[in-house]
């Protein structure tokens, strides 16, 4: 789960893990972010990736 850094921690997206790599899906403001691999640098300063439970 990707946690947004707001007053309250809110779910901003998720990381889907596959054998061949990861797919990052999330929102940043009013825009969707889709990326293969890691969280994009532009979004990393606003997001924290929570550990998988």
Image (cartoon, rainbow, N blue to C red):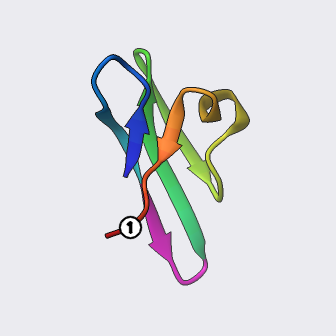
Check the image and report above or below for 30 versus 24: above
Residue at image x 43%, y 53%?
Answer: 50
Residue closest to the eye, 11 or 16 = 11
**Which quadrant would the C terminus be assigned to in this image?**
bottom left
Q: Which residues are magenta?
A: 15-20
Is 48 left, or right, of 21 in this rendering?
A: left
Q: Is residue 10 left or right of residue 4?
A: left
Give how far across and how far down residue 38 sits, in percent. 65, 54
Name the outermost residue toward the right: 41
Considering the numbered disc 1 on the image, is that residue within a helix, a strand or a loop?
A: loop
Give the x, y percent position of residue 45: 63, 28
Q: Is residue 43 left or right of residue 29?
A: right
Residue 13 on the magenta segment: no
Give the main secondary structure of the magenta stretch. Answer: strand
Q: Is residue 17 magenta?
A: yes
Residue 49 is left or right of residue 3, and the answer is right
In the picture as drawn, the residue positioned furthest to the front comes out as: 7
CA neighbours of label 1 inside 10 A, class few (<14), some (14 to 19), many (20+): few
Residue at (61%, 46%) from the top-left corner?
Answer: 39
On the image, the x and y values in percent for residue 15 come to: 45, 57
- In terms of image quadrants, where is residue 52? bottom left
User: Which residue is drawn at the image coordinates 51% and 51% (left, top)?
Assistant: 24
Instruction: Please report the residue visible at 49 percent of the width from the left and 77 percent of the height from the top.
Output: 18
Residue 33 at x, y = what percent? 51, 35
Q: Which residue is mark 1?
A: 52
Q: Height in image: 43 above or below 35?
A: above
- Of the pair 39 and 9, the residue shown nearer to us: 9
Question: Can you say whether 2 is above or below 9 in the image?
Answer: below
């Amino acid at each position: 789960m990707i946690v947004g850094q707001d007053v309250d921690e809110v779910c901003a997206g998720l990381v889907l893990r596959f054998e061949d790599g990861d797919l990052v899906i999330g929102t940043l403001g009013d825009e969707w972010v889709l990326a293969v691999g890691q969280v994009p640098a532009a979004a990393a300063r606003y997001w924290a990736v929570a550990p998988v439970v």
